[in-house]
Image (cartoon, grey):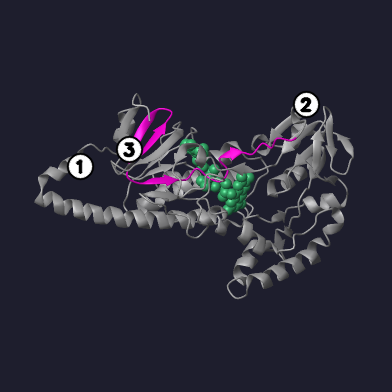
Amino acid sequence: MTSELKRVWVSQPVIIGAGPSGIATAACLKEKGLPSLILERENCVVSLWRNRTYDRLRLHLPKNYCELPYMVFPPDFPSYPTKEQFIDYLDTYAKHFSIEPMFEEEVQLAEYDSTMGFWLVQTNKSEFVCRWLIVATGENAEPVLPEIDGISDFQGRVLHTSSYKNGDEFEGEKVLVLGCGNSGMEISLDLCNCGAEASIVVRDKLHILPRDILGKSTFGISMWLLKWFPLWLVDRFLLFCSWLILRDTQQLGLHRPEFGPLELKSATGKTPVLDVGTLAKIKTGQIKVVPGIKRFTSRGAEFVDGKVREFNSVILATGYRSNVPSWLKEREFFSKEDGYPKTPFPNGWKGKNGLYSVGFTKRGLLGASIDAQRVAEDIAQQWNSETKHFQFRKNKCPVSEGDRSGMINHREACKNR
Ligand SMILES: Cc1cc2nc3c(=O)[nH]c(=O)nc-3n(C[C@H](O)[C@H](O)[C@H](O)COP(=O)(O)OP(=O)(O)OC[C@H]3O[C@@H](n4cnc5c(N)ncnc54)[C@H](O)[C@@H]3O)c2cc1C
């Protein structure tokens, strides 16, 4: 670590990332009477939702599965709140818990100093020294940009879904959407609704389920059924309902995996697509399904079936990845390969030496909320026992006063910068 950076001692837990996971953790700590310091690389809270999502986005899951701890959604919000409503909710949440992150602090390095017994966290501006470090930088920290043969030769527009806003500027264009998760499917629909000719690359097998069954959320029904029935049986039920509502997707070039949707989700974390209307457009041929790409050409792409097609633009719906391996110098808890905790949910929230993770569960906001509560509970226990111990020692031995005299709180840290 460089010594030119200003070193700031913080007595409270340091949270990296002011997304839903980070602010939920700060709120849970606050509920237990503990302060915290959030370091966020952008200049606002929930920057992913504010800056890197498309206009027509709504929560994919019903609102009651997306609430953060201690605050419900306003009752007048629809079951699937819009992106703006969700941002409003998160802003209100941050305000309610007086969460004031330090913005434009990008963590570039964090490592545990075993001699001191503290974490050293280096950002672009300062170095923080803390006892508890909570990683909440998310599963979607960086866009995945695949290297496909010839992509640099393609003369049209290439953009990742994180930069896509709406289909207006693609009107009349032939657009290739690469990737058929929830975002790829929904963006294809948006393009089609805006007068673009959308083709979607479907390389692998996938499960598409109706978002709702008889007006009830498919996700909600699954959660309810899982209380009584085994996973495989709920999967059978979901596939039967899908067949009744969506009919055979196989004929459209959308082949189902051999494992059921919930079994696959639990084994691999792969989320089924919840259809919001794309399938109907595929059925009518307004959205085309195309196989994997062999290579890009200057004007389009050649596919694995040997066909060559021309496109004006390519949208990479190729997902995101964690950025933890690029800055966290730690080997046991987080995997170097994918940047997720090595132990999966529900046990992947606590590492060693005061290291925690929130929001790496592959279970969306619900998983993040569960993590946040566990982390706060655990730190609060340590904080309380250490404070008692400290007070006891303080009464007996005044020298220990010095242990904490070098530490300052968040506001002082901000003031001193
Ligand atoms: C399009 C889309 C739709 C989704 N819809 C749903 C849904 O309906 N329901 C659901 O449950 N889940 C949904 N998810 C999944 C997930 O719940 C969200 O991605 C959610 O935003 C995750 O919150 P997070 O705080 O863990 O991560 P993020 O929201 O990504 O927040 C992480 C924060 O960390 C910051 N950060 C990253 N690296 C650093 C660094 N080095 N230093 C400092 N700060 C850093 C980022 O700037 C960001 O603000 C969706 C995801 C996407 C992409």
What secondary structure is marked by label 3? strand
> Of the residues shown, which amino acid type is indicated by label 1?
Asp
Q: Which residue is more in the foreground, 411 or 78?
A: 411
- Whether the magenta-drawn stretch holds residue 41 is answered as no
Magenta residues span 120-148
**Residue at position x 65%, y 55% from top?**
271
Residue 164 place in picture, x, y as percent:
68, 36
Residue 310 place in picture, x, y as percent:
86, 33
**Whether residue 237 is situated above or below residue 197 in the rendered picture:** below
Query: Is label 1's Cβ within 8 Å of ligand 1?
Result: no
> Of the residues shown, which amino acid type is indicated by label 3?
Val
Would you say residue 73 is visible in this rendering?
A: no
Dot 1 alpha-carbon crowd within 10 angstroms: few under 14, some 14 to 19, many 20 or more: few
| Numbered circle sitting on residue 403 | 1
Count of residue discs: 3
Dot 2 alpha-carbon crowd within 10 angstroms: few under 14, some 14 to 19, many 20 or more: few
Asked if labels 2 and 3 touch by Cβ distance under 8 angstroms, the answer is no
| Numbered circle sitting on residue 153 | 2
Quarter, ligand 1: top right
Question: Residues under labels 3 and 2: Cα distance?
Answer: 47 Å
> Of the residues shown, which amino acid type is indicated by label 2?
Asp
Disc 3 marks which residue?
A: 129
Placement of the N terminus among the 4 image quadrants: top left
- Whether the magenta-drawn stretch holds residue 132 is answered as yes
